[in-house]
Amino acid sequence: MNQSERRIYLIKELLNENSRYEDIEIPADVQGQKKLLRSLMNVRMAGSISEEFIKIQNEYLSEENKALGIVHLDELNEVEKDIYLWQGDITRLDIDAIVNAANSQMTGCYQPCHACIDNCIHTYAGIQLRNYCNDLMVKQGFEEPTGRAKITPAFNLPCRYVIHTVGPIVYGKLNEKHEELLRSCYLSCLEKAEENELESIAFCCISTGVFHFPNKRSAEIAVQTVKEFKNKRNSGIKVVFNVFKDEDLIIYRNLLVKK
């Protein structure tokens, strides 16, 4: 199968899972097909699927991820010892673990083609990630508390693991509890990384965006927490601060790059 044939196969299989989709027509153009496939993957509930589907999905996502361009840690600029700053799509990083800003259900974003990091990570990891997360949550029996973290395989992503953490949602004025919970997110992720003997981790800007944590204060907490952890533990873990927006790049540069 070529990439086009894989995409059509995956769309048809997902459409056939649900009778409500019987009137949906597959677009003729590539971008339309990609949008439909991503949407179907995003809204699909956790559940078993054929080994043939997984095989073809893995082949498809492998090619898609290569096309996005895989970025290796040694290509990044070290701004301080074992600390890096990089602007781009975190799903492209070839690193031990990337951090996902998850919600308390921990099974990904169900909004079709939403631009959040949770959606992107689950899309390019494949449907196995949602299934894996769902199994963890069923076993746990309750929603994930804010400030904690869980580690999962990365499946089709270039990284080896995904560390999922639930950041605080800021309603109204920022307070000390919000800051304490955000600090706990970073510590929990670093502890998970060390427990699993990982040598590198990439943090997104946890709780900013739709969770409304002020960008500058979020970055200050992130940098301070990481540095304190590394100093207290004498940890050699390599940490990437991954940003997507220009605003965050400027903030982190001011915090990390020595004048």
Image (tube, grey):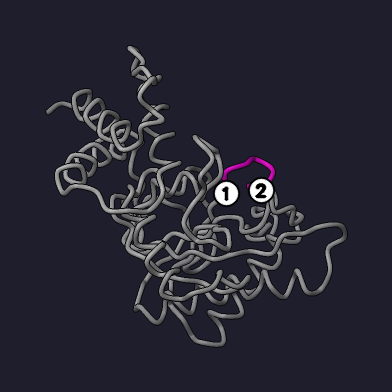
Percent x, y of residue 192: 44, 76
Observer-nearest of 232 and 256: 232
Magenta-drawn segment: 243-249
Residue found at the very far top of the displayed protein: 28
- Residue type for callout 2: Asp
In the picture provided, is 217 more to the left or to the right than 245?
right
Give the numbered dot on residue 243: 1
User: Which of the 4 quarters of the picture holds residue 219?
Assistant: bottom right
User: Which of the 4 quarters of the picture holds residue 180?
Assistant: bottom right
Which residue sits at x=58%, y=63%?
A: 104
State the SS at label 2: helix
Which residue sits at x=18%, y=24%?
A: 5
Observer-nearest of 196 and 143: 143
In the picture provided, is 191 more to the left or to the right than 174?
left
Percent x, y of residue 83: 51, 64
Give the numbered dot on residue 174: none
The answer to whether 187 is drawn above or below residue 84 in the figure is below
Observer-nearest of 85 and 146: 146
Observer-nearest of 89 and 235: 89
Which residue sits at x=66%, y=57%?
A: 207
Whether residue 226 appears in this view of the structure is no
Residue linked to disc 2: 248
Marks 1,2: beta carbons within 8 A: yes
State the SS at label 1: strand
In the picture provided, is 201 more to the left or to the right than 225?
left
Whether residue 12 appears in this view of the structure is yes
Which residue sits at x=63%, y=67%?
A: 223
The answer to whether 100 is drawn above or below residue 199 in the figure is above
